[in-house]
Image (tube, rainbow, N blue to C red):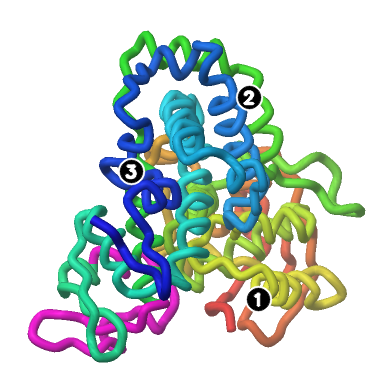
Amino acid sequence: MAVRRASSPLDDRSLFAEYPFLPGAEALLGGEAVSVRGLLEEPAYATARALGRTRLRAAADDPRGAHELDELSRADPGVRFLSFLFARIVLSAAVQPATLRRWAVAEAKRSYARLAGVPVDELAEVARRLGHSLAASDVGVALPLVDYIRLATPIREAEFRLARQEVRAGEVRVGAVRAARLLQEAVRLRLAQPLPLAEEVVRRVREQEAELFEELARRMPLPVQRPGAPGSAIRPDRFPPCIRKMQRTLQHGENLSHAGRFCLAAFLHRAGADEETIVDAYRGAPDFDESITRYQVEHITHRDGGRGYEPPECGTLRSHGLCARDGDPAATEPADRPRDPLCFEEYLRHPLQYYRIKGGAVLERDGVEGEGGVTSRGGSHDRSGARGRTRSTGPR
Ligand code: SF4
């Protein structure tokens, strides 16, 4: 079928070149049979593999998908599709699933950049091929209530809440740009699922692309210590389960509550992370906006001569549903799955206390009160918990 843009038709070939994740996109190969093994090894596909690696590097650098890849726009649609497929196969074999999730966010956001400006019939066609029903309506588009709930639930922006939507006869009516944002979510969900690969393929990819995996790991931002931060380097492996879960939620491109976002920024700052590192922690968020994030991070970290707000204590995090001491059944990292005995110690009252006991260095503070509802007296969260009383409310 042909899908129309404002004045020119977007045929199947162009549609698949723009949205290579759509079922049926293999039609771009014009009947050419390409095996997984062939794509991974044969010289004929070297260009597609190189382009696929470029896609992966761009996503590792910036999951907002804002990178305009000239090589991608210039490439033949068949090569573009194969580069996409190669990237997906490689990440489906990755030991570290965060790379797949980060790429899924990047590709979804890249698609959104186009979807937000296309006519409704192209939106509807992409939605249909992704298994969602979407039709033109008086205000833009209409989609079934159940589809809306499924796609809007991970989105944090208040304007996506169901209570704010126009619902008529089992359908939700939204503007075209909002529909594009919902489809971004549909793309992310689809691409975050690894392809089922045979063990032999996984082994081969891991051997063949070992250097690429190392490079991606280097490119994905790790905590960087700010100048003048306390003693030893930041130790993310010693962060408490709640903080690791907050990081993972954002890496998945999923929603993290306002309280969680505040806690993560305040914790990273007190653990000595520099501002870039803290901003980077939010790049995977579905609603990431760099300027807003920078403003909020500055607000949290610049307070009180740079000491920043104190992150909430365990009791507060528990009341917000952010404590993860029981382990997270959905966690893919083994360290996040089991119940953590330290978190059940009676004296454990604060995530920074956990980090300190595990050997992490924490920026001290000595009695700061103020807006943001964070107070710390004594500030030292030692093993006994006798000092360092904290009182927190949520962020402003
Ligand atoms: S007990 Fe405290 S440190 Fe441990 S997961 Fe819960 S909130 Fe985090």
Quarter of the image that includes the C terminus: bottom right
Q: Residue 220: x, y in percent?
A: 65, 41
The single residue placed furthest to the right in the displayed view is: 228
Residue 212's disc is 2
- Residue type beneath disc 1: Ile
Mark positioned earlier in the residue sequence (1 or 2): 2
Residue at x-position 58% and y-position 51%:
63
User: Dot 2: few (<14), some (14–19), or many (≥20) neighbours within 10 Å?
Assistant: some
Mark positioned earlier in the residue sequence (2 or 3): 2
Residue 376, visible in the rendered structure = no
- Residue type beneath disc 3: Ala
Residue 378 versus residue 32 in the image, above or below: below
Quarter of the image that includes the N terminus: bottom left
The magenta stretch spans which residues?
A: 150-177
Which residue is nearer to you in this view: 283 or 272? 283
Q: Secondary structure at mark 2?
A: helix
Residue mark closest to the camera, 1 vs 2: 2
Name the residue tied to disc 1. 292
Residue at x-position 41% and y-position 16%:
202
Name the residue tied to disc 3. 330
Mark positioned earlier in the residue sequence (3 or 1): 1
Residues at marks 3 and 1, CA–CA distance in whole angstroms: 30 Å
